[in-house]
Image (cartoon, grey):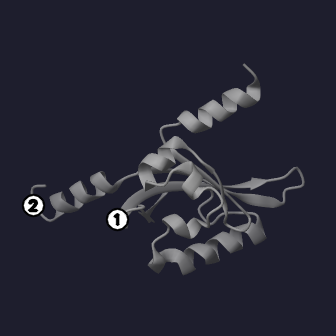
Amino acid sequence: MSHDSIEALILEQAAEAIIYANKAGVIERWNAAAVAMFGYTASEALGQHLDLVIPEHLRNAHWRGFDAAMEKGTTRLGGRPTMTRGLHKTGQKLYVEMSFALVTDSAGSALGSVAVARDATERVERDKAAAAGQPR
């Protein structure tokens, strides 16, 4: 098996959602875990803008950060995971723990961004219920 085909299998079979968007914010990679998390098949997501999975109230902040990262060549969080909200195909809002990295060419110019994400909705809701003293 070739190195490239093993890399493709790793990306597709990873437990976390792996999403790559080009510099314009258009989705070019969408693995099986992204399908499971967000509800869109790869054919539905590929070629779409990242707004597909970003709740409307977070889009302006997201694009300010995304555009700044593309311009500066660094992310604000430096790869550290952050909790954010995501949007499922059904309209349900998810709590998503994500880390982001820039993808650069050999000259260091940003080509796009890769996000690795896991659904934290159940954990966050359980923690909120415990903090409120209510059984789930």
Label 1 and label 2: CA atoms lie apart by 22 Å
Q: Quadrant of residue 73?
A: bottom right
Q: Is residue 80 visible?
A: no
* Towards the viewer: 26 or 128: 26
Q: Is residue 97 left or right of residue 120?
A: right
Q: Indicate the quadrant containing the N terminus: top left, top right, bottom left or bottom right.
A: top right
Identify which amino acid the numbered label 2 is placed on.
Gln
Compared to residue 11, the image places residue 99 above or below, namely below
Residue 67 in picture, x, y percent from top left? 69, 73
Which residue in the structure is indicated by mark 1? 92
Q: Is residue 33 visible?
A: yes
The three-letter amino acid code for the residue at tag 1 is: Gln
Res 88 quadrant in image: bottom left
Residue marked by disc 2: 134
Category of crowding for the residue at label 2, using alpha-carbon neighbours closer than 10 angstroms: few (below 14), some (14–19), many (at least 20): few
Give the quarter of the figure containing the C terminus: bottom left
* Residue mark closest to the camera, 1 vs 2: 1
Residue at the location (14% across, 65% down)? 132
Q: Nearer the viewer, residue 125 or 51?
A: 51
User: Nearer the N terminus, badge 1 or badge 2?
Assistant: 1
Residue found 58% across the figure and 37% down from its top: 12
Please tell me which residue is depicted at 61% across the width and 75% down the height of the picture.
Answer: 63
**Mark 2 residue element:** loop
Q: Where is 56 relative to 95, above or below? A: below
Name which residue lies at 28% across and 52% down: 122
Residue furthest out toward the top: 1
Q: Nearer the viewer, residue 33 or 71?
A: 33
| In the rendered image, the vertical position of residue 60 relative to residue 110, given as above or below | below
At numbered mark 1, what does the secondary structure look like: helix, strand or loop?
loop
- Position of 135 compared to 67: left or right? left
Q: Position of residue 21 (x, y in %)?
A: 66, 59
